[in-house]
Image (spheres, rainbow, N blue to C red):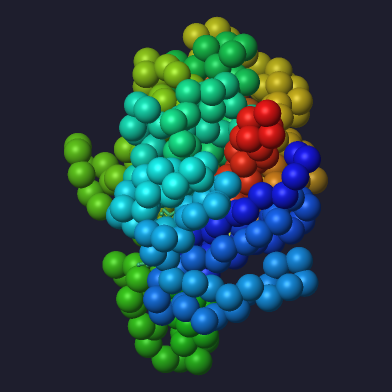
Amino acid sequence: MERGYHVAIVGATGAVGLELLSILEERKSPVAQLSLLASKRSSGRRLVFAGKEYPVQELTEHSFQGVDFALFSVSSSISKAFGPIAARAGAMVIDDSSAFRMDPHVPLVVTEVNPHALQRHQGIIAHPNCSTVPLVMVLNPLHQRAGVKRVVVATYQSVSGAGARAMEELDQQTRALIAGEPAAVSVFPHQIACNCLPHIDAFGELGYTGEEWKMVRETHKILEDDSIRMSTTTVRVPVFRCHSEAVNIETDQKISAQEVRQLLATAPGVAVIDDPEKSQYPMPLTVAGRDAVFVGRIREDPSHDQAINLWLVSDNLRKGAALNMVQIMELLSVEKDQ
Ligand SMILES: NC(=O)c1ccc[n+]([C@@H]2O[C@H](COP(=O)([O-])OP(=O)(O)OC[C@H]3O[C@@H](n4cnc5c(N)ncnc54)[C@H](OP(=O)(O)O)[C@@H]3O)[C@@H](O)[C@H]2O)c1
């Protein structure tokens, strides 16, 4: 990266937007000009980047003049309305909503897994769902070595995956319960404090939720293999940050737990913590704020000759969202500089 860019963050005041700001600062991204965009409600609010205050401006169709990279982290309806406007104004759009993920003209990219897909972009690049990202980072090396045939996964997803208001709701409900008061419910369909909700996104086809189908369809698109059979259950848990997943992976060729451990220990962006005797395994509390996808509890499935069980934990606001978006920007900046 040789010069500075004009970067716009659309949804700058949200859970992912704020994380984008801190990751751009941490990675010393070459930001020469910064536009912080959100709804009218946030207009006038000020956010700090690299020691300097920037005003939050209302998102309008004129927000993208001269913008090199537009990092979108808003609802899919706002992305659908404003993403193409930003692309037409000349910005490279990196969008983390579900607006464009399954569009055949839009690459859906995890930088360690399918960076080659970026070559086909037409101005908009999609970032996957925060549960799909860590799953494909773990499946990809196993798929290349032994052919992944079938995946059964249950997620344990933190409230930050549902945005800033959801984090406030868990905080307020927890405080209310400790004070012996009733917990007010507004973001989630039921109380989330001291509870688990097997319900993320709307129920749809075959009784599976939108979140469950997103994991299936996005995995197929990123790994470029629709033949992988998948069964998903997504669950919201009362954790502030980090999504965990219990994954059963059936392969074409037999692969030992030891080999899986070695493969994943050298896979880009993946780290193994797997010493059950010393109670060492990944947990949301120890993974929060870290970049890698952490994997542990790697073991052969006693009920199947060619299947492995494992447990993964990933910070949904970092690799599951803001970090992967900034990494996509870093790869695209090579193209911009040419
Ligand atoms: N959270 C995650 O882990 C995660 C991971 C991957 C993908 N995503 C996706 O990222 C997107 C944002 O998620 P989030 O968790 O950051 O949500 P969030 O905390 O609720 O933030 C939403 C952002 O959208 C802005 N916004 C709302 N209405 C707007 C409008 N009319 N015009 C312009 N901006 C508007 C909000 O601004 P105000 O503050 O002004 O309302 C806020 O900055 C969603 O599509 C989500 O699916 C999230």
For residue 105, which quarter of the picture?
A: top left
Question: Closest to the observer: 184 or 62?
Answer: 62
Q: Position of residue 20 (x, y in %)?
A: 61, 57
Instruction: Say whether residue 22 is visible.
Output: yes
Q: Position of residue 315 (x, y in %)?
A: 61, 52
Residue 169 vs residue 314: left or right? left
Would you identify the image quadrant in which residue 333 lies?
A: top right
- Residue 237 lies, in percent from the top left, at 47, 60
- Residue that extends furthest to the top in the rendered view of this protein: 253
- Residue 300 located left or right of residue 127: right
Q: Is residue 173 above or below residue 325?
A: below
Left or right of 214, for residue 11: right
- Residue 8 placed where, x, y %? 55, 57
The image quarter in which residue 149 lies: top left
Q: Quadrant of the C terminus?
A: top right
| Quarter of the rendered image showing ligand 1 | bottom left
Residue shown at 40%/76% (left/top)? Answer: 40
Tell me the residue at 35%/71% (across/down). 187
Q: For this rendering, which residue is in front, 16 or 255?
A: 16
Report the front residue among 110 and 135.
Answer: 110
Which of the image's four quarters has the N terminus?
top right
User: In this view of the protein, can residue 196 be seen by the observer?
Assistant: no
User: What residue is at 47 percent from the left and 78 percent from the top?
Assistant: 43
